[in-house]
Image (tube, rainbow, N blue to C red):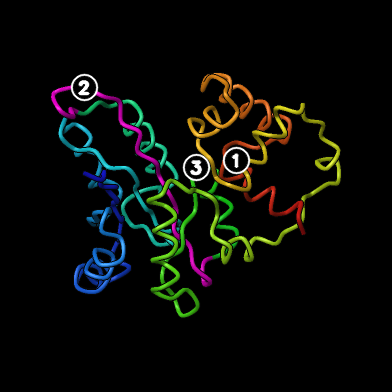
């Protein structure tokens, strides 16, 4: 039996509930049968869920527009709290206690502010598209299919929005070891997880973490999402 990928969308009143449950969910069930969707009104409403040992989701999607459209608290602090809760709490699966591996993703569209996308990319595990006049339902479905398959690379439409240049040319002079170059390529271009990289390169997952950390440090970056955005800059 195929594993179901559980996805939560934090709405914050941006879209009517009927649009989500009557339009998106039926379409997603048809196109992506191995994914399940649910919606929560705001980030805070998810906090108590992590004390439930039966609650576990794979991805939580938060709209980038939350940075400027949030009436209940500082969204940056809330996202940090959400990441901390998802990483530090346990759940029960098949009578076994396991650590949650929930990933927090930010959704952006052609109307989102570039500064907001860059700000939130420092906090989350990846970027996704949200619906607007230029990002169609078909594009969103394709984006979600990639997500369910484990591909966390930045969607091309968002990559095209992030065409800012690096502040200096020194970044191009950074020297990576041969192994670091392999890891850099797999993370930045393919969105590969540590587990996938470890299997592909036949090295321990803990070793991959060390290489990823070294690459981020050399480029002065904080996480994989920033690395993917940065790599896109160097291509332009």
> Mark 3 near mark 1, Cβ–Cβ under 8 Å?
no
Residue shown at 35% from the left, 38% from the top: 102
Q: Secondary structure at mark 1?
A: helix
Q: Quadrant of residue 88?
A: top left
Taking depth in this image into account, of 125 and 33 the one nearest to the observer is 33
Which of the two labelled residues, at mark 2 and mark 3, occupies the earlier sequence position? 2
List the residue tagged with mark 1: 187
Q: Position of residue 5 (x, y in %)?
A: 29, 47
Q: Position of residue 4 (x, y in %)?
A: 25, 47
Q: Secondary structure at mark 2?
A: strand
Q: Nearer the viewer, mark 2 or mark 3?
A: 2
Taking depth in this image into account, of 168 and 144 the one nearest to the observer is 144
Kindly identify which numbered label has been placed on residue 236: none
Q: Secondary structure at mark 3?
A: loop
Q: CA distance from mark 2 to mark 1?
A: 29 Å
Looking at the image, residue 164 sits to the left or right of residue 140; the answer is right
Q: Quadrant of residue 15?
A: bottom left
Q: Which residues are magenta?
A: 92-112
List the residue tagged with mark 3: 123
């Amino acid at each position: 039996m195929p594993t179901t990928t559980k996805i939560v969308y934090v709405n914050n009143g941006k879209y009517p509930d009927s649009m989500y449950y009557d339009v998106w969910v039926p379409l997603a069930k048809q196109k992506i049968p191995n994914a399940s969707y649910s919606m929560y009104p705001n980030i805070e409403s998810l906090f108590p869920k992590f004390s439930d040992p039966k609650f576990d989701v794979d991805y939580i999607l938060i709209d980038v527009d939350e940075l400027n459209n949030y009436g209940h608290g500082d969204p940056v602090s809330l996202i940090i709290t959400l990441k901390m809760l998802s990483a530090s709490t346990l759940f029960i699966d098949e009578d076994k206690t396991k650590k949650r591996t929930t990933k927090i993703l930010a959704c952006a569209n052609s109307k989102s502010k570039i500064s907001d996308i860059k700000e939130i990319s420092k906090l989350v595990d990846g970027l996704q598209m949200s619906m607007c006049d230029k990002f169609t339902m078909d594009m969103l479905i394709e984006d979600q299919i990639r997500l369910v398959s484990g591909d966390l690379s930045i969607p091309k439409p968002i990559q095209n929005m992030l065409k800012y240049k690096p502040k200096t040319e020194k970044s191009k002079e950074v020297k990576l070891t041969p192994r670091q170059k392999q890891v850099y390529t797999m993370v930045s271009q393919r969105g590969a997880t540590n587990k996938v990289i470890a299997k592909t390169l036949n090295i321990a997952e803990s070793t991959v973490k060390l290489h990823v950390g070294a690459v981020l440090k050399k480029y002065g970056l904080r996480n994989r999402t920033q690395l993917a955005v940065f790599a896109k800059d160097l291509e332009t």
